[in-house]
Amino acid sequence: MPETNQETLTILYTNDIHSHFETMGRIAAMMDELRAESPATTLLLDIGDHMDRAAIETEGTLGQVNVDVLNLTGYDAITIGNNEGLTFTPELLSQAYAGLHSSVVCGNIVELRSGQPPAWMRSRLVVHKEGFKIGLVAATAAFAEFYELLGLESLNPLDTIARDVGMLRSEVDLVIVMSHLGLPMDRQLAEKIPGIDLIIGGHTHHLLEEPLQIGSTMVTAAGKFGNYLGKVVVRRDSITGRFRMDGICLPVVEGPKKEKVESAIASQRKAAKVRLNRTVVVTDRELLVSYEAESPFGNLLAQAVRRHTGSEFSLVNSGQLLASLPAGDISEGMLHERCPSPINPCTMRLSGEDILVSLEESLLEEKMGKSIMGFGFRGKVLGGICVDGLEIEYDPSAPPYKRIIQASVAGEPLREEQTYLVGTLDMFTFGVGYERLKRGTEKRYMLPEFLRDLLRIELQTAGAVESCFQSRWKKVE
């Protein structure tokens, strides 16, 4: 197509930044530089998981720092990821987004009570960019059981995207799907739903340095943590009306940063530290954590989960705790620093056999030191299993999977064929870490409390610190 007959739209996007604030000022500067070439025909989008409560800035401001960055960078529209939708209550998101300048678009999340999107969210959006009429359609990963506990319903994204594309297709020049659904789902969207010009993806942290072309739909994504800035250039022949799209992911390397963004982050970081410095309890004993052996801090976490879930006993992993807890004044920030993962407690019924196999696995060195990622886990290694309500006799010198001599609950031996109500962690229900725990039935998730909230309550409970020093794993040699 001759250059003189072309109209051009530039789309700049980010996805899965996860509160990596060290990249945000640089991204904003890059966006400013690229937008300066044609400000009237540049569209800025974020595809979700911009917020992550593992960062003290986000935790301490409940997402306000992320909103400041989005505003100062100049985004036109964003969608939510599971980190926004599930680690914040709808009320907290409403407060955070009250000052957001851009629109929040997501078509597959509605209120259970009304069947309508929350007041701060739009199902779809039409944006005008000097000659281009753009339809924005969006959806986020549908963790139905979790959203229901927050008073929300997550609809089938294939259905809602097909609905919204159908409603917008004849009204706009270009249909863009903002998909926080993962690459496998993005492929399905491109294959099954006609009328989509571009899918910008996230959730599975995939990097498509060269976009995929699936039928008439382009699919792209820019990795994770703000390591890349996505760019798509849409060229339309002004005579024929035909489109051509080219995509690239630009590495975010050292360079000038947008001073207003950097200043806002620094200011909010200072405020977050002040808020998180509030003392929640005073302890007189240091609580050590170990990933290779039983430890008081690990036991305290197991106690906290058992008490909160009301289960017969609890199973957690010591890798949730990133450091020991000192004696003295304990602040919210100290608990956040040691337990930053947005992991929720849950209960499920597990067979004695699956429990015993998992306990045996936790004695394997390769399991204790295994690095795991995803499903909310922000630790470094899996660690061993910490328990409360169980007593385990084991021989560390025995062969693997034959080390446990007996596990007892309430003084009775654990029976392989019997099922037990176990308090544990939501990530285990997805087969992460200890695969046999995924077999549990009657799963009941508990939101919005995180493990650090349970730790705070346990530390404030009379006698809890003393109890965590009582041994549950007893060596028999």
Image (tube, rainbow, N blue to C red):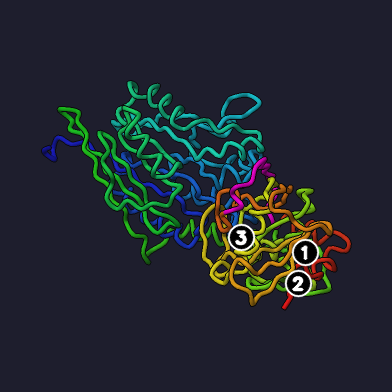
Quarter of the picture holding the C terminus = bottom right
Q: Nearer the viewer, residue 49 or 399?
A: 399
Q: Which residues are magenta?
A: 436-452
Rendering coords of residue 51 (x, y %)? 54, 51
- Magenta stretch: residue 451 in it? yes
Residue 226, quarter of the rendered image: bottom left
In this rendering, position of residue 138 left or right of residue 431: left
Is tag 3's residue or tag 1's residue first in the polypeptide sequence? 3
Q: Nearer the viewer, mark 3 or mark 1?
A: 1
Whether 318 is drawn above or below 288: the answer is above
Which badge, 2 or 1, comes first in the chain's sequence? 1
Q: Is residue 12 visible?
A: yes
Q: Position of residue 174 (x, y in %)?
A: 31, 31
Q: Residue furthest right?
A: 462
Position in image of residue 34 (x %, y %): 31, 51
Q: Marks 3/1: CA distance?
A: 37 Å
Q: Residue furthest left?
A: 2
2 and 1 marks in contact (CB < 8 Å): yes
Position of the N terminus, as image quadrant, is top left
Residue at which label 2 appears: 474
Pick the residue in front: 291 or 108: 291
Mark 3: amino acid: Ile
Find disc 3 in the rendering and name its residue.
56
- In the picture, the disc for residue 391 is 1
In the figure, is residue 178 to the left or right of 400?
Answer: left
Q: Residue at x 57, y 34 (%)?
A: 120
Mark 2 or 3: in front is: 2
Q: Is residue 370 magenta?
A: no
Q: Which of the 4 image quadrants contains residue 476?
A: bottom right
User: Where 128 sits versus 408, above or below?
Assistant: above
- Position of residue 141 measured from the top left corner of the image (x, y, whole percent): 50, 40
